[in-house]
Amino acid sequence: MLVDDNLANLTAGKNMMKEQYEVFAIPSAAKLFEFLNHVMPDLILLDIEMPEMNGYEAIKRLKGDARYADIPVIFLTAKTDEGSELEGLELGAIDYVIKPFSAPLLLKRIENHMLMSEQKNDLREFNDNLQEAVDRKTAQVMELQNAVLSTVAEMVEFRDENTGGHVDRTQRYLQLLLERTMEKGAHSDEIRDWDLAFLLPSAQLHDVGKIAISDAILNKPGKLTDEEFEIIKEHPAIGVNAIKRIGENASEHDFLVHAEIFAGSHHEKWDGSGYPHGLKGNDIPLQGRLMAIADVYDALISLRPYKKPMAPEKAREIIKEGSGSHFDPALVDIFLEVESEFAAIAREYQAQYVLREDME
């Protein structure tokens, strides 16, 4: 697009360029913006000294509009002072051509800038394609990582006949708690540093240490002895060690950071009476305090050889009663806000169990 209020300049400029380019001769900056609603040019040749809207005002408007900001602009002017040229370049022009101009010089400058623009577009397209490839590869790695996590978690769950679906349900409970915590802006300083794409899948490994616990204890159809319970209490530390060993043999193991914390802290209690380290209050990692609620709630609503599944309403009351002793009081308050959604998940599981039992 050639923009100039002088008809002779428009005619001469169009004649110079018409054999190589499709040229729109436009008599004012106002008309330029009307044309831009219908045609997107590869380059704008813009006169500076025009009535109503001069070239400086026009380029400010162009560069301030995302639709037109990337269109290259060459200023055409009779001004020869350094200040005018500098002002034009600072406003975003790519070149500054003095009138009257020679046809070969103008065409060569246009050719050079069109080539640069084409190369810039090619580079942008290459970068976009490269980013798509990186995103696709990252998604594949994440998919593989999550598949490994799920498989390991399922292996643990398969050994523990009493906890079918526990991993899936606790992950869903955890997501509800975490989403509401974020909505309320609670623990924002800590949560904003978390990569949530890693956090939720890594929660599947919170009980990975049970893989080293004897089947005789893990599947005992009754209350454990004190000695057996002490053995069960070893599973957080076993899980942490297993996850650390995986990390030592992997170059990229960010997804294991949360897994280690979940495994090692989900049995700690707010009042310090938990295990394995007897941590108290905010010394317990936030991941562990969140998982403690999800883990205990699921244990309460689930079938065990030594007990029937508890009604969600009863489980709610037990979690509430544990506020300040077993659980973080602030997180219990958040749990109570989303408890109806917990209950829906619990009833879904219990309905599946009843149906399976009837079929058997």
Image: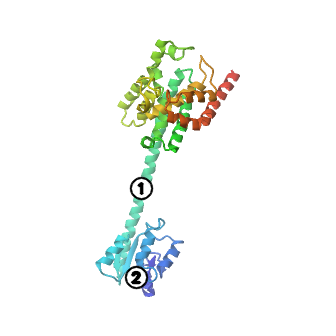
Asked if residue 339 lies left or right of residue 202, the reply is: right
**Residue on which disc 2 sits:** 49
The quadrant in which the C terminus is found is top right
Q: Is residue 323 above or below residue 229?
A: below
Instruction: Tell which of 281 and 163 is nearer to you.
Output: 281
Which percent across, then down, holds residue 229? 48, 16
Q: Residues within 10 Å of mark 1 (few under 14, many from 20)?
A: few
Q: Is residue 77 above or below residue 196?
A: below
| Residue 126 image label | 1
Which percent across, then down, holds residue 25? 47, 80
Instruction: Tell which of 235 and 285 is nearer to you.
Output: 285
Quarter of the image where one finds residue 137:
top left
Asked if residue 193 lies left or right of residue 31, the reply is: left
| Residue 233 image label | none
Q: Amino acid at mark 2?
A: Glu
Identify the residue at the far bottom of this view.
8
Camera sees residue 155: yes
